[in-house]
Amino acid sequence: FKQKIGAQGQATGAINTTDTYYAGELAAATNQSVTIPTDGNICVFSANGDFYVRYDGSAATVPTGSIAASTVDLNPGVRDVSTVTTLNIIAPATTKITLAFYA
């Protein structure tokens, strides 16, 4: 995972491409488990709707009711998953999602 440096020597915000992309569709309110690939230390998430991720190996659930402590992460952008083996992902509505993994 490297950030591209521009011609002026400044960080551009662009990152290198990866050869480990996962893409699919999350069915509404249905947990989906994803095994993190070998050397998948960083995960970049992208989706066309809201989704929640759980990192501890348990099934993710869509939060409801009053505000309380939770174990799900709403719409993470980039996460260090080097100590995680499985992502559990859920969305309240049908959602297309991509995961890009980096060493």
Image (cartoon, rainbow, N blue to C red):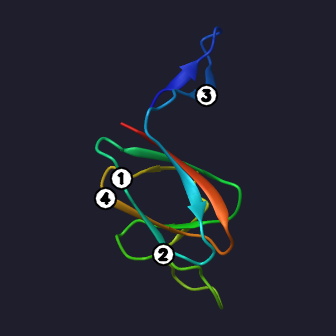
Q: CA distance from mark 1 to mark 3?
A: 23 Å
- The tag earlier along the polypeptide, 2 or 3, is 3
Q: CA distance from mark 2 to mark 4?
A: 15 Å
The mark closer to the camera, 4 or 3, is: 4
The mark closer to the camera, 1 or 3, is: 1
* Residue assigned mark 1: 36
The amino acid at mark 3 is: Ala
- The tag earlier along the polypeptide, 2 or 4, is 2
Q: CA distance from mark 1 to mark 4?
A: 5 Å
| Label 1: few (<14), some (14–19) or many (≥20) C-alpha neighbours in 10 Å | some
- The tag earlier along the polypeptide, 1 or 3, is 3
Going 56% across and 21% down the picture, which residue do you hit? 4
SS class, disc 2: loop
Going 56% across and 86% down the picture, which residue do you hit? 68
Going 50% across and 74% down the picture, which residue do you hit? 31
Do the CB atoms of the residues marked 1 and 4 lie less than 8 Å apart?
Answer: yes
Q: Which disc is residue 14 wearing? A: 3
* Residue assigned mark 2: 60
Question: Could you say which is closer to the camera, residue 7 or residue 56?
Answer: 56
